[in-house]
Image (spheres, rainbow, N blue to C red):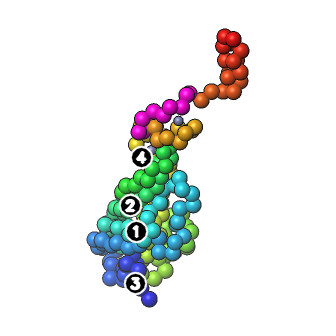
Amino acid sequence: MAIDPLIVGVARLRRQAGATVHTVVTGPFDPDGSLAPTSPGESYVPEGDDLAFDGLLECIPGGVVVSGEVTSRWRGECRRCAKAVGGDVAVTIKERYLESAQPGDDEAYPLPTDLLDLGPALRDAIVLELPLAPLCDEACKGLCVQCGRDLNDGPCACETPTDPRWARLDVLRSPE
Ligand SMILES: [Zn+2]
Ligand SMILES: [Zn+2]
């Protein structure tokens, strides 16, 4: 069985309240594939990519506080022109792991043994920071709705979209 690098032993740390340990780990973002993108417009962490954590674990009564920075990469599609876009995401976290917590608790992550699984806290933080509707550029002009040309490359030959009702009026107005 492969060892998950995001699972950290905290038995020694937990012998003394207030003790801290600097921890740097890198591990798979989505080991079971459950966070795969659900639509092409959403951004996601590339499959097989790692996330990294650099921070402190601190022993508190009944558990451990995890604080530090989580970093990962993301990819997606520009919501206007569908060009591939991507970047880095970095989030500062401060989360508690408690013996008394149950899976799904809002307040803290469970710490049933002296093996602390950083994965859930790190993944939750990254998922919240992924761009919902990424843009290749704030000024992206998008695609022409008629011919599909990427208007960032210059204007297309299409006329301004005409409402059919006005088109009929144009015919009435035009000279014989
Ligand atoms: Zn774009
Ligand atoms: Zn066009």
The residue that mark 1 highlights is 49
Q: Is residue 147 left or right of residue 173?
A: left
Q: What's drawn in magenta, residue-wise?
A: 152-160
The residue that mark 2 highlights is 73
Q: Quadrant of the C terminus?
A: top right
Which of the labelled discs sits on residue 3, or is there none? 3
How busy is the neighbourhood of tag 4: few (under 14 within 10 Å), some, or many (20 plus)? some
Residue 154 location, x and y as percent? 42, 35
- Measured in 3D between alpha carbons, the distance from the residue under mark 3 to the one under mark 1, in whole angstroms, is 17 Å
Which of the labelled discs sits on residue 33, or is there none? none
Question: Label 4 sits on what residue type?
Answer: Cys
**Secondary structure under the numbered disc 4 in the rendered image:** loop
Q: Are marks 2 and 1 in contact (CB under 8 Å)?
A: yes
- Measured in 3D between alpha carbons, the distance from the residue under mark 4 to the one under mark 1, in whole angstroms, is 21 Å
Which mark is nearer the camera, 4 or 2? 4
Mark sitting earlier along the chain (4/2): 2
